[in-house]
Image (tube, grey):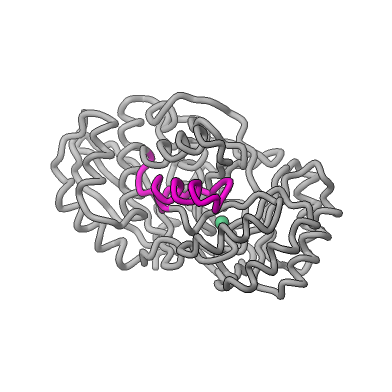
Amino acid sequence: MFKIKDIKICNIGLPLRQTIHMSNITIERSNSILVKVKSSDGDFGWGEAAASLSMTGESSVGMIQAINYMKEILVGVEIQSYESISDLVQTSIYGNAAAKSSLEAALIDLFARVQKKSFSEIIGKIKRSDLPIIWRIAGSENEIEEAKKQRDEGFKAFKIKVGAKTIKEDLQRAERLRVALGNEVQLTADANAGYNRKSALLFCSLIDKAGLDYMEQPVNGYDIKTMKACNELMSTPLSADEGIHSLEDLSIHKNMNAAEGASLKLIKFGSIKNLLGAIDFMKDNNMHVNISGKAGDSSISAACIGHISKVVNKLDWFSNVSIQYLADDIILNPMSIRDGKLIINPGLGLGVEVDEEKIEKYAI
Ligand SMILES: [Mg+2]
């Protein structure tokens, strides 16, 4: 099919429109690793993974090291099938899920372009074309007015970032936002693992009156006992995110009644096959499914999330992308969000045409 000739790694930081305030982290610009895989026939594919010490434990420096290590193994290898891409990447190095996911996405993008198909046609069967996405409400002064504006423009799902303010203030925010946005939209809150056990139990014991559709990850991902206790305290469904890196994590949460749904990220699962398998498990076990990227992802990652979202067997808690919060992007054919839905560019592979001058501009 094609032989891998070279793998180029770029470390970039994109400017954000607004600073993001999460429970215990403030993000002023993104940090992602981009991977460009070239074939000996001159074709190429792109992948991206956010560097996130808080989410995957992988820094950009470490990801560059890991991809360089995998590059030594991969350059010169002949790719024969889609299945062989995952096997090759997954067995090339232990751990390093985010680094692996960027390389795998670039190889699948390249494979799809060679096959004259879209990324989604390669990874599965298309189940949906409508992709509603979630608007993030992250603590800006005019967040209620901004959220109402987005609702009027078609957004049907909103996620409030909580944990950076006091519990009382965050409960008030949730209640006010529900009143302002109405009951027709999906409104959720995400603490990004920011509370200790005591605060998590307090928050969850009071949150039902806000009428949220779900509450995400009040405590750190290791504390499954507190997740279970939170789940028992509220009728609002509980979602896990930072605690879910594999099908095994999902199984543990399900068996302990510690989550009724989860947000899945490709950078945590390390491979699309693993991610799709996890969603099949969730469907079989009546768990709710959200697929999300990382704050600050560019259109390469957004396209990847979009294509995965098209083929998964369940997606009742919608998808998140981050391009709407970027002050600049790195592709020549910008992706768009229309009526609160992600519009995937037509074309081969991921459908993105990367602007390499922009990558130079935002190189770290
Ligand atoms: Mg989350």
Relative to 128, say whether 4 is above or below: below
Classify the position of the C terminus by image quarter.
bottom left
Horizontal relation, residue 229 to residue 1: left or right: right
Horizontal relation, residue 327 to residue 308: left or right: right
At x 40%, y 64%, the residue is: 363
Ligand 1, by image quadrant, is: bottom right
Horizontal relation, residue 320 to residue 59: left or right: right
Horizontal relation, residue 21 to residue 310: left or right: right
Q: Which residues are magenta?
A: 245-272
Taking depth in this image into account, of 11 and 170 the one nearest to the observer is: 170
Taking depth in this image into account, of 259 and 171 the one nearest to the observer is: 259
At x 56%, y 36%, the residue is: 286
Q: Residue 47 colored magenta?
A: no
Residue 90, position as x, y percentages in the image: 26, 46
At x 65%, y 62%, the residue is: 161
Residue 163, position as x, y percentages in the image: 64, 70
Classify the position of the N terminus by image quarter.
top left
Taking depth in this image into account, of 331 and 169 the one nearest to the observer is: 169
Q: Is residue 55 visible?
A: yes
Residue 91, position as x, y percentages in the image: 21, 46
At x 55%, y 69%, the residue is: 27
Residue 332, position as x, y percentages in the image: 49, 45
Tag count: 0
Q: Residue 263 colored magenta?
A: yes
Taking depth in this image into account, of 255 and 249 the one nearest to the observer is: 255
Q: Is residue 19 visible?
A: no
Image quarter of residue 185: top right
Image quarter of residue 357: bottom left
